[in-house]
Image: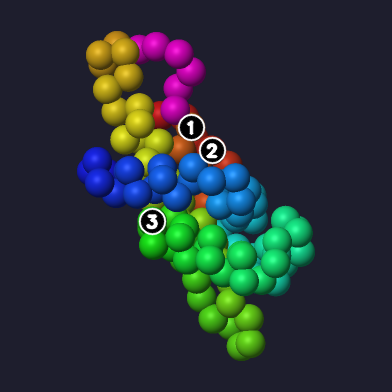
């Protein structure tokens, strides 16, 4: 990941409601959640939710898909892992330090250590 997309993603996550939405979508896994279910789970009004989801989508952190009358949103796990990788890219000058980074594998819903 390059600096500009990383800044865009971090900026999108630097807001309480958007961070809560993104974390909820990460928990939901690759199938995601319907917009109405997100609104209910987080007690957010539909117009407010729509605004925040648009910001997250613009930052490349979430994807949407239409299924009948419903729009489902899911976290973009590749983008999330890319952001984590960007943040830890030069950790400790290349020397082993601290806990190993955990990369989320949305297929198995289990993290794998690198």
Q: Which of the image's four quarters has the N terminus?
A: top left
Task: Identify the magenta region.
Answer: 96-101
Q: Closer to the camera: disc 3 or disc 1?
A: 3
Neighbour tally class for label 3: few under 14, some 14-19, many 20 plus, Cα within 10 Å: some
Question: Residue tagged by mark 3?
Answer: 59
Question: Residue tagged by mark 2?
Answer: 111
Residue placed at 31% from the left, 35% from the top?
Answer: 86
Report if the CB atoms under discs 2 and 1 are less than 8 Å apart.
yes
Quarter holding residue 50: bottom right
Q: Earlier in the sequence, mark 3 or mark 2?
A: 3
Q: Is residue 26 above or below residue 67?
A: above
Q: Is residue 93 above or below residue 73?
A: above
Residue 10 visible in the current orientation:
yes
Counting from the top left corner in percent of width and height, residue 111 is at 53, 38
- Please tell me whether the stretch drawn in magenta is mainly helix, strand or loop: loop
Counting from the top left corner in percent of width and height, residue 30 is at 55, 59
- Alpha carbon distance from label 3 to label 1: 22 Å
- Does residue 79 appear left or right of residue 48 in this picture? left
Neighbour tally class for label 1: few under 14, some 14-19, many 20 plus, Cα within 10 Å: some
């Amino acid at each position: 990941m390059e600096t500009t997309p990383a800044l865009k993603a971090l900026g999108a996550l630097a807001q309480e409601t958007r961070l809560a939405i993104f974390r909820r979508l990460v928990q939901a896994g690759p199938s995601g959640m319907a917009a109405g279910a997100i609104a209910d789970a987080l007690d957010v009004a539909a117009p407010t939710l729509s605004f925040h989801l648009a910001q997250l989508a613009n930052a490349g952190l979430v994807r949407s898909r239409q299924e009948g009358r419903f729009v489902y949103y899911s976290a973009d796990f590749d983008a999330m892992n890319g952001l984590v990788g960007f943040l830890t890219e030069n950790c400790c000058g290349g020397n082993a330090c601290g806990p190993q980074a955990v990369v989320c594998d949305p297929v198995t819903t289990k993290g794998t250590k690198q």
